[in-house]
Amino acid sequence: MIQEIYAKVLLNHVPQPDHWFGLRYNMNLYRGCQHQCIYCDSRSECYQIENFRDVLVKVNAIELLQKELAGKRVKGTIGTGSMNDPYMPLEKQFNLTGQALEVIRQFRFPVHIITKSDLVLKDLETLQEINQIYAAVSFTITTADDDLGKQLEPGAPLVSARYRAMESLAEHGILTGVVMMPVLPYLEDNIENMNALVTRAYNSGAAYVIPSFGVSLRAGSRDYYYRELETHFPGLREQYQNRFGNMYHCPANDAVRLREVFTVLCDQFGMATSMPVYTQETAKQLRLF
Ligand code: SF4
């Protein structure tokens, strides 16, 4: 079900410093997500989203963004894509992300997007203009295998489509890379997957790959994930239950070794393993040119 709602506030302040993506503000233009990844943390009870399949569309988001940015004294990166995907299929219909980027361009703020969709390419021109300040697009990729990806992220575009979109963004000078989170124990925590994922990222113009070797599960997201494991991967639910019980962070098998191999691989390719973020210094340098 898709429902239109009116929000009171759009931009949230991100606690500083944000070591992951260097964000100062965060926005969610929608609530709920059509990509329906089986491991999604946004299903957790703490977020109080009643039915994650229902998508709420904040129809006054653009008006709010204009008003809120006009009152911001501090320029800082605006992030989107943490609680839902800004390029889920209904973005084709509502174009809220596209319109929000247009407002961000007008106010000359930096932006960072996390997505699993090649639909981001529809906003390439606006992103190029924002890139005079700073624009970065991170693609979440957890497996290099399209078939496995389809089982884990049933509503999202194929992994191969994400790599192609990354290539296109990189060719147009947009900073792009991979968020390799989660790495699912028993499904994705093997050297072959990591090698393939990182190598394809490099070949697609990624400047960075940000890893997290494991998955976080809490009340709400855990139950859903376990049910899906039972359906698609017989026997795996029991393995998880025996090993992790109710643990929040469920580490990948052989996580230390995986990290070592990952780090060497990224070094060889010259890719960063953390986000090259926007800073006031970058802005000053750009102004000098
Ligand atoms: S794309 Fe992100 S927010 Fe959407 S279902 Fe997948 S993990 Fe959750």
Image (cartoon, helix red, strand yellow):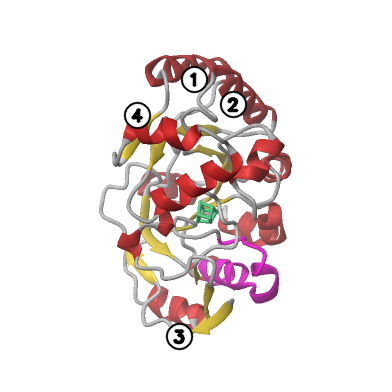
| Res. 6 mark | 3
Amino acid type, callout 4: Arg
Residue to which mark 4 is pinned: 243
Q: Kindly identify the residue that appears in the image at 42 percent across and 57 percent down.
A: 42
Label 4 and label 3: CA atoms lie apart by: 43 Å
Is label 1 within 8 A of ligand 1 (CB to nearest ligand atom)?
A: no
Q: Position of residue 167 (x, y in %)?
A: 71, 39
**In the picture shown, does residue 28 fall above or below 190?**
below
| Res. 198 mark | 2
Q: Nearer the viewer, residue 184 or 258?
A: 184
Label 3 and label 2: CA atoms lie apart by: 41 Å
Q: Which-is-in-front pick, marks 4 and 2?
A: 4
Q: Position of residue 221 (x, y in %)?
A: 41, 52
Q: Which-is-in-front pick, marks 4 and 3?
A: 4
Mark nearer the N terminus (3 vs 1): 3
Label 2 and label 1: CA atoms lie apart by: 8 Å
Q: Which-is-in-front pick, marks 4 and 1?
A: 4
Mark nearer the N terminus (3 vs 2): 3
**In the picture shown, does residue 274 fall above or below 131?**
above
Amino acid type, callout 3: Tyr
Q: Secondary structure at mark 3?
A: loop
Residue to which mark 1 is pinned: 262
Label 4 and label 2: CA atoms lie apart by: 28 Å
Label 3 and label 1: CA atoms lie apart by: 44 Å
Q: Kindly identify the residue that appears in the image at 45 percent across and 85 percent down.
A: 6
Which range of residues does the magenta coloring cover? Answer: 86-104
Left or right: 244 in relation to 31:
left
